[in-house]
Image: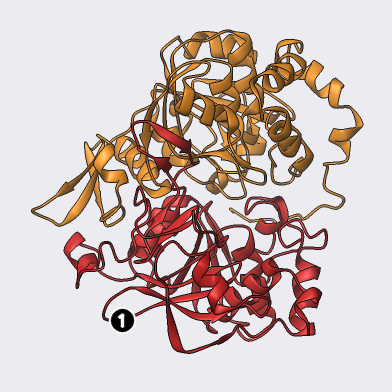
Amino acid sequence: MSLEEALQRFVPNGASVVMGTALEALIPFAAGHALIRQRKKDLELIGPISDMLFDQLIGAGLVRRVTAAWVGNVSAGLGHNYRRAVEHRIPRSLELEEHSNFSVGLGLLAAAMGVPYLPTRTLLGSDLGLRNRRIAAAPESGLMHVQAIEPDVAILHVQRADAEGHAHCWGNLGITREAGLAARSVILTAEEVVPSDVILSDPNRILLPPHRVSAVVHAPFGAHPSPVQGCYGRDHAAFSEYHRMSRDREGYLQWLQEWVLDVPNLEVYCRKLGKRLDALRPTRARLAAPVDYA
Amino acid sequence: MSSAEYTPQELMVVAAAREIADGELVFVGMRLPLLAFGLAKRTHAPSAIGIFENGLVRDHVPPPDLYTMSDAPNVCDGAWATGLVDVMQLLQRGDVNLGFIGGAEVDRFGNINTSVIGSADAPQVKLPGSGGGADIACLAQRLVSLMEHDRRRLRERVDFITSPGYGDGTPDWRQRQGLVRGGPSAVITTLGVLRFDPSSHEAFLASYHPFTSPTEVQANTGWSLQLDEDCAPTPPPTPDELRLIREADPHGFWTR
């Protein structure tokens, strides 16, 4: 299935979408940019931190609600579009459900486990609990209860997958597993699509059971400019360039035109970046020792 | 070594590294604390273990030139590569001795705001949010925060408590919220190091950086900042410490 088909089928207008689940790594930028080109409306974005992607989607006017612990640009600073939307309703107003990283993870884990909430000691004494309808103090236990977060769809980027939905993902995982088990549908965007026997040779590294996966999409460099372990490093310059460009609305719109609207798909995006992508490839392999399952 | 030979950020890294004792589990975070963790491991705390909220545990020195904790080299030689909930469990069960966070604003009782300046319903400035900061402030045994020293940032009361310190400073405030441990032990700023009185929970100036003075620090603080009776200049970086920091941040991205 193509990326565009998968998004058309599984991300209707108004959908809640969890993305950027591995924190600064494996962020599905290609999927995010395709959502902009498909002119989706009224999405709810769910994630722990978002290193730039949520800011881009907010600026494009697709987003009605943000359920997250942090929205900005990790190496460069504040998210300018996020600020414009919350402070000045430009391009539109945003509903916020502000979390900590742990409480987003627990909300997804509760949905993954099929329970209405999970108790925790985090956020006791924080004002975040006063303004978030999913987080409430439970006087009888003295704990906070985080209600389940069940996204309509999870978009997860992985190193390799087969066509049936078995996927290998490695490096830091953030809340990727919880998101994949909590969401009603899961779209995997994969650097490589490989024969099943490659994935099944190492079942401990498989991200999710295959019945959880709705679509597998081949998307090489689909997480650029975020890093993908073993495939490419973080393109730091892209984060600082975006930060500089998006400082005012006109600059952001210019960025959007050049890098999203004038780029029909991921293949053209990669061609546009050219040698810049080669420079992000690791200079030497760091292979793990083989594992014998005999 | 004169102050012209190092930046305030380099001194902050050194001061933060000195908060780490050997063998401790440290919830590291990004930016200057990441450099501080590496420096501590290469000097007085070789057995310290670092925990990163993206789902990493490291017992080796982090590689140089990291822009984020999820840069691929930070995973190599990791002691555990897993998910966020796993490492937050370590924090919640009390394994973590020390947590670091950055902040936009801190108040005299060590409460940190990274959510909003102005009213939450009509923000003057919308800040990025908690990230893992609130989790670390609630659950680590000790909390050290780092920030720029400015009257607008060090305030009598913050507009919003994202990451709780000692609340309103009344006795047992944390216990009354249900928090079973923790609280701020230091605020390291571009001008000095603040610590907290064990009975009043109020921040006082423990040391001022060699290029400033207690009077200047007080003038840049939004409440009437008390001085420790032993208040002295912050010990400057040694040449070895500076060399190690510059190896870890070769382009000065975080410290220049």
Viewer-closest of A179 and B173: B173
Secondary structure, mark 1, is loop
Where's residue A137, x and y in %? Answer: 18, 48
B115 displayed left or right of A82: left
Quick one: A280 or B154, which is closer to the camera?
Answer: B154
Q: Amino acid at mark 1?
A: Pro
Q: Is residue B49 above or below residue B165?
A: below
Where is B26 relative to A159, above or below?
Answer: below
Q: Position of residue A199 (x, y in %)?
A: 62, 38
Residue at the image position 76 percent from the left and 58 percent from the top: B65
Q: Furthest residue to the right?
A: A275
Horizontal relation, residue B2 to residue B134: left or right: right
Tag 1, which chain? B
Query: Which quarter of the picture shows residue B16?
Result: bottom right
Disc 1 crowd, CA 10 A, few/some/many (<14, 14-19, 20+): few
Residue at 70 percent across and 70 percent down: it is B10
In this orientation, which residue lies closer to the viewer: B104 or A6? B104
Q: Colour of chain B?
A: red
- Per the image, the residue denoted by label 1 is B198
Tell me, yes or no, if residue A192 can be seen here. Answer: yes
Query: Residue B99 location, x and y as percent?
Result: 47, 67
Please identify the quadrant where the C terminus of chain A is shown.
Answer: bottom right
> In orange, which chain?
A
Residue positioned most to the left: A140
Q: Residue at x 78, y 39 (%)?
A: A237
Position of B87 relative to A97 (above/below): below
Q: Quadrant of residue A274?
A: top right
Seen at 43% across and 74% down, the residue is: B97
